[in-house]
């Protein structure tokens, strides 16, 4: 089973994955930190923003593809942001920057690979905006990027995931981490 955990920065993806790993130690769980390490091992080349964007997308697709190809029959893999999110980000981030890059043409092969990798279950952790802001302020974890941009695009990203048949939304606003793990365990069994 392939499970992808989605949601905005600070919603509890890493906490959920850690809880699931504790409950199911035989699951292969990936984290955002592993993806960052993958990118750090492949430093950007001299070049413009568009070339570097394509370069990082290719590295991340190779990362997902490697895990996908090495999985064993019956193995459960939990992705912190799965292939569907990588496709979403790849297609929409340049437009968010105001760039008119031909992503479909320049990453045709990579997008084809991503589109063949389908999650069996996508858990989209949702949270009320006020609760998310509180969590972000109190979190010890340093977060990169612009949290405001994340929230501004939340409706667009959410609508992308709503159209996928395997998505389950879970509002974590009033749930503690253990309750979130318990709710998701039911969907995985």
Image (cartoon, rainbow, N blue to C red):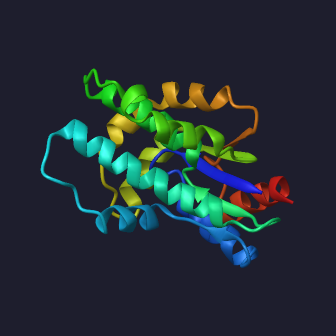
Residue 82 image position (x, y, % from top left): 57, 49
Say left or right for 70 vs 141: right
Residue 52 image position (x, y, % from top left): 24, 45
Say left or right for 75 vs 115: right
Please count the marks in the image: 0
Q: Quadrant of residue 73?
A: bottom right
Q: Is residue 97 above or below residue 183?
A: above
Residue in front for this viewpoint, 148 or 54 = 54
Residue 3 image position (x, y, % from top left): 69, 54
Residue at horizontal 69%, vertical 47%?
A: 119
Residue in front for this viewpoint, 27 or 141 = 27
Say left or right for 84 vs 38: right
Q: Residue furthest left?
A: 46
Q: Is residue 141 visible?
A: no
Residue 181 image position (x, y, % from top left): 72, 62
Residue in front for this viewpoint, 183 or 114 = 114
Q: Quadrant of the C terminus?
A: bottom right
Q: Residue furthest front?
A: 109
Q: Is residue 86 above or below residue 64?
A: above
Residue at horizontal 30%, vertical 54%?
A: 144
Residue at horizontal 74%, vertical 47%?
A: 121
Q: Is residue 170 visible?
A: yes
Q: Quadrant of the N terminus?
A: bottom right
Q: Is residue 103 above or below residue 113?
A: above
């Amino acid at each position: 089973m392939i499970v992808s955990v989605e949601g905005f920065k600070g919603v509890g993806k890493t906490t959920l994955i850690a809880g699931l790993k504790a409950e199911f130690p035989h699951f292969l769980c990936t984290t955002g930190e592993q993806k960052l390490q993958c990118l750090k091992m492949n430093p950007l080349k001299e070049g413009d923003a568009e070339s570097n964007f394509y370069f990082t997308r290719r590295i991340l697709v190779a990362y997902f593809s490697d895990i996908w190809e090495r999985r064993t029959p019956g193995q459960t893999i939990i992705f912190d942001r799965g292939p569907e999110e990588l496709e979403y980000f790849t297609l929409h981030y340049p437009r968010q920057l105001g760039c008119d890059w031909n992503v479909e043409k320049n990453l045709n092969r990579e997008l084809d690979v991503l589109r063949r990798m389908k999650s069996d279950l996508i858990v989209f952790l949702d949270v009320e905006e006020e609760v998310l802001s509180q969590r972000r302020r109190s979190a010890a974890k340093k977060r990169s990027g612009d949290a405001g941009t994340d929230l501004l695009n939340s409706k667009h990203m959410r609508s992308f995931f709503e159209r996928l048949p395997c998505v389950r939304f879970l509002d974590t606003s009033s749930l503690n981490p253990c309750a979130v793990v318990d709710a998701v365990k039911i969907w995985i069994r």
